[in-house]
Image (cartoon, grey):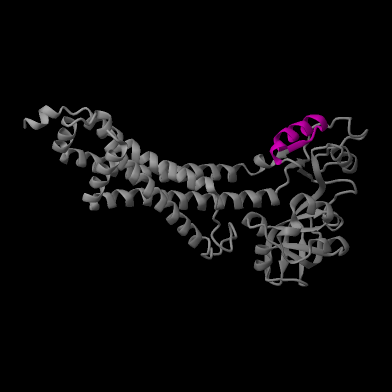
Amino acid sequence: METFVNLGIAKVHLVSRKRQSFIALTGVAFGVSLYILLISFMEGINLYLMDSMLSSTPDVQLLANTGNSKSEVGPSGNIGSDFIKNTEVLLDHIREDKNVLAVSPVLTQQCILFSGPVQLNVRLDGVKINEEMQVLKLSGKMISGNASDLAYKSNGILLGKGLADKLNVGMGGTVTAFTPEGRMAQFRVVGVFRFGLGFVDNTRAFLNIGSVRQLMPAEPGQATSIHIRLKDPDKSKEMAESISSRYGVKAEDWATSNASILATVTARNVLTYVVSLALLVVAGFGIYNIINLTITSKMKDIAILKSIGFTGRDIATVFLSQCLVIGLIGSAIGALAGFGFSEALSRVSFPSSETVSFSYFPVSFKARYYLIGVFFGVATSLLPGLLPSIKASGTDPLSILRR
């Protein structure tokens, strides 16, 4: 029979059972829209966290260890029990690598930072600020002051936003550092930064490497770590293994340094897909029930159609067409609703938190989420209708008409 005749019959079935058709459409639209909303929100969070991690963590970090150094770097070795020695020689070797974009020595000291009655345990990172800015992209994270000002202010300090708030100090204010060894120094705030991660913004400060050297028993040319930024972050693991093997220094890639956060990202992605697909599967069961009931109530109509020349394929086409129409319209509505929900969510202010710092709920708008949502919406509409349609196509018209 002609295809348009089959589609016409399918249209009559859908229109004559408006309530059931509306419920099926709503189920598909709800599943698709919620999938798009969830995946857009979760991906937005993941992208924010990944950007914050890559900005606040070097692609490769070299750390001092107690192993024997290799003589390739210098005659006196490059590794001490607490410090990396001969850093300038090591830095020159690393800069020669064509994959390296920037490299910076760091001298880290744990201390108590206090302003007035407030005292906090913090991590002071002594850096050569112009080099560190290329590694951590610090200039783009400043919310007040300029990171580069640290280069010509020997007693300057850059504070994380959370740290500055807890100390109740702002631009031009002074803070005092006190080390476990009893050393003390006063610094003036020349900038406040925010990476958006609590474990960075609440506990970290940057100073000139020379200022930190005054607070700890470190000699010129020594560092507690070396930060490296690569042209391609995906090569960080390979680079870390190469440097560790070549120079006898402990090297960590950014993924290893942030393994716990990456594990959380993976778990969140899995949960998002499971919940979203579960919603679409539930919508699919609703469609199955509706099509099955339609076929049961139309058995005599099916028998008559087959007796006047409709083939089993025509009958299957009638009912699968209904599923397809429900899937396409429901998915289209769901995609539009998902975009609307996502857009509305992206305009909602995010509650302040010490763990992460968003101005608004982070939402990612990518076309593939909508395409995947429509695909699953149509698939979960067609598949549930397949079995009842095959059942209807194999119906014996005589057995039905004899009842």
**Furthest residue in direction right, as rendered:** 75
Q: Residue at x 72, y 71 (%)?
A: 170
Assign the C terminus to one quadrant of the image. Answer: top left
The reply, left or right, for residue 288 in relation to residue 356 is: left
User: Looking at the rendering, which quadrant does residue 115 occupy?
Assistant: bottom right
Q: Main secondary structure of the magenta part?
A: helix
Q: Residue at x 6, y 30 (%)?
A: 402
Q: Please check the rendered image and state whether residue 360 is part of the magenta-colored stretch, yes or no.
A: no
User: Residue 351 versus residue 180: which sits nearer the camera?
Assistant: 351
User: Residue 288 versus residue 321: which sits nearer the camera?
Assistant: 321
Q: Where is residue 369 in the image (x, y as percent from the top left)?
A: 50, 46
Q: Residue at x 86, y 60 (%)?
A: 151
Looking at the rendered structure, the number of numbered marks drawn on it comes to 0
**Furthest residue in direction front, as rendered:** 2
The reply, left or right, for residue 66 in relation to residue 344 is: right
Q: Please check the rendered image and state whether residue 239 is part of the magenta-colored stretch, yes or no.
A: yes
Q: Where is residue 130 in the image (x, y as percent from the top left)?
A: 84, 55
Assign the N terminus to one quadrant of the image. Answer: top left
User: Residue 301 versus residue 4: which sits nearer the camera?
Assistant: 4
Q: Where is residue 202 in the image (x, y as percent from the top left)?
A: 65, 59
Residue 285 in view here: no
The reply, left or right, for residue 246 in relation to residue 356 is: right
User: Looking at the rendering, which quadrant does residue 394 occupy?
Assistant: top left
Q: Position of residue 248 (x, y in %)?
A: 80, 32
Q: Which residue is drawn at 85% across and 58% down?
A: 211
The reply, left or right, for residue 59 in relation to residue 78 is: left
User: Looking at the rendering, which quadrant does residue 265 occupy?
Assistant: top right
Identify whether 158 is placed above or below 92: below
Q: Magenta stretch? A: 233-251
Residue 395 in view here: yes
